[in-house]
Image (tube, rainbow, N blue to C red):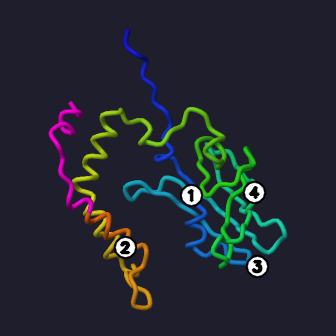
Amino acid sequence: MAKFPTFPTLYDNVIAVSIMKLREWGYLKPDQYKAGTLSWSTNGRETGSISIRVNTRTDGPYLELDYKHRDKPVNYTVGLVSVPSNIGKGVVWYFLCPHTGKRCRKLYSVGERFLHREAYTGCMYESQTYSHKARKLNTLFDKIYGTDKLYEQLYQKHFKSHYAGKPTKKYLKLMQKIKQTENVRITRTELLALY
């Protein structure tokens, strides 16, 4: 008898709030109160928006979310925690999930609220749904066509290849990966293993 198919919710397809984006948009500056609207779109059509307020003035900084879920108004706060950076320059911000209490850098909206990924059951990332053969095939294509992505990184607008006359660690690592991908030889056994 055939296995009954499951169609898990994919984290890649749900809307999310990211610390990285909040920092990029200037919401996480010290000692400030800032409000705004986040919106999501698919193929140029807006799929959702929420009002946010970030307060870093208080002893307990927080993110306040205000939106409608299926015509029901939803309003709650998510704690923000800052940890000193390991390089001694500034701080690293995290959300404090209201459900699990865990620190995280991204909150997903699978149900009514934005929560840490471990608060949901039956959800996966798209790559977790691939078969063993598909994963091998992706690895093989990355070996063949991976140089394109590496060259894109190399020629990004603000990429620093040298600092004080010496090549940066990131530049050296990137050049090593480019050299490895250009010298790739795919064996017959690797190709046959896919079939």
Q: Residue 77 carries which label?
A: 4
Residue 147 location (% of width, % of height):
25, 62
Q: Residue 31 carries which label?
A: 3
State yes or no: discs 2 and 4 in contact (Cβ < 8 Å). Answer: no
Residue at the far top: name it: 1
User: Disc 2 designates what residue?
Assistant: 172
Give the Cα distance between marks 3 and 2. 38 Å
Looking at the rendered structure, the kind of residue marked 3 is Asp
Looking at the rendered structure, the kind of residue marked 1 is Ser
Give the Cα distance between marks 2 and 4. 43 Å
Q: Earlier in the sequence, mark 3 or mark 1?
A: 3
Residue shown at 59%/49% (left/top)?
108
Looking at the rendered structure, the kind of residue marked 2 is Leu
Check the picture and name the quadrant holding the C terminus.
top left
Give the Cα distance between marks 3 and 1. 26 Å
Give the Cα distance between marks 2 and 1. 41 Å
